[in-house]
Image (tube, helix red, strand yellow):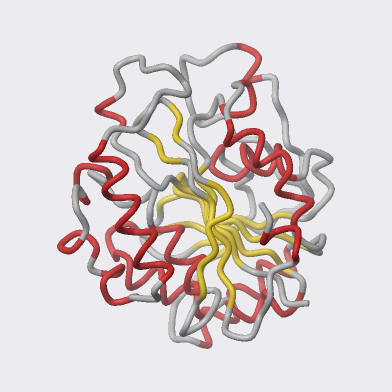
Amino acid sequence: MTLPSLFLSHGAPTLPLTDTPARTFLREAGALLPRPRAIVVVSAHWETAAPMVNAVTSNETIHDFYGFPRALYDLRYPAPGAPDVANRVVELLQADGLTCGIDNKRGLDHGAWVPLLLMYPQADIPVVQLSVQPHLGPAHALRVGRAIAKLREDDVLVIGSGSYTHDLSEFRGQDVNGKAPDWVNGFADWFDERLRSQRIADLVDYRRNAPFATKNHPTEEHLLPLYTALGAAGEHPQATRLHTSATYSILRMDVYAFTAPGEELPSRAKAA
C-alpha cells in the first residue's frame, strides 16, 4: 500500500526521558504503519535559504541544544543514510522547478532523531533529512511536499517534524503534563477543523485567519513541516488526527496522517 505522510510534534528534546502521553504514543506509532524502506524527515531545526537534503552513508546524532540532563546527550540514533533517496528528492524537486542542494556531512538534528528514536528504536531504517525555508512560508512548504509526493509510492515514509504550537516565551516551568490554555487550544482546534475540511487556502493564510496564530507561532519554522507533510498527500489531502495532547501546557503534541483520496490508513492506525 502507499504510505501516508505524517506530521509529528517532537516537543522538547527531553521527550524520550519524560513520561507523557506523546511519548507513549510515539513509542507505539512505528507499529501503526507498514515498515518503510526509508524515511525522509522535514525538520524544523534545519533552516536553509533553499531546500537541502543530507546524503550520507551513516547519520551522526546532532545534539543541537544545551542545558539539558546528561542522559540526553548520551542518546544516539545511528540510522543509516540513503543517498539514493536523497538524489530522488533532488530529482523530484528539480522536476517541479525548485532547486535542492545536497549536504554530504550533516547528520540528524533532534527534530529528526527524537521522534524516530521512539518510533523505530533499532535505528535500522535509512533516514534522509530535508530542510525548511521559513522566509518562503507555508505555500512554498506545501509545494515542496507536493513535489516529493511520489516518494510515498516507493515505500518511503515522509515525516514533517515540528510543533503544533510553539511559543516558548510562555514557558514558566509548567508541569510536563499541564493543561493547555485557551489560546493554545483555540488555535489547535481551528487548525484541526481546516485540516479535516480540506480548506487549504485558509491553512496557507493561517496567520491572518487563525485565532492566536502569531502568538502560538512567533516564527514559522515549527509549523512549516506540517505543510510539507500535507502536500505530500497530493492536491486533496485527507487528514486523520492520530494523537492529541499537550506538554508543559504550551506545546500541543498533535500527530496527523495525510492520505490522498482513495487511499486507506491501516486499521491499526485508524484506531490510534
Report the residue that reaches farthest toward the left.
208
Q: Position of residue 33 (x, y in %)?
A: 76, 60
- Horizontal side of 130 relative to 1 (left or right) equals left
Q: Residue at x 41, y 23 (%)?
A: 178
**Front one among 47 and 101:** 47
78 sits left or right of 106 in the view: right
Residue shown at 48%/26% (left/top)?
A: 65
Q: Is residue 159 left or right of residue 188?
A: right
Is 227 located above or below residue 162 in the figure? below
Image point (47%, 21%), residue name: 176
Q: Which residue is outermost to the top?
A: 70
Quadrant assignment for the N terminus? bottom right
Q: Position of residue 67 (x, y in %)?
A: 46, 14
| Most foreground residue, 11 or 254 | 254
Left or right: where 58 falls relative to 259:
right
Residue 2 rendering spot, x and y as whole percentages: 72, 77
**What is the x, y in percent for residue 64?**
51, 31
Q: Height in image: 139 above or below 137?
A: below
Most foreground residue, 253 or 169? 253
* Res 84 → quadrant: bottom right
The residue at the point 60 percent across, 66 percent down is 5
**Is 182 rendered above or below residue 1?**
above
Q: Name the foreground residue: 232 vs 257.
A: 257
How many marks the image carries: the answer is 0
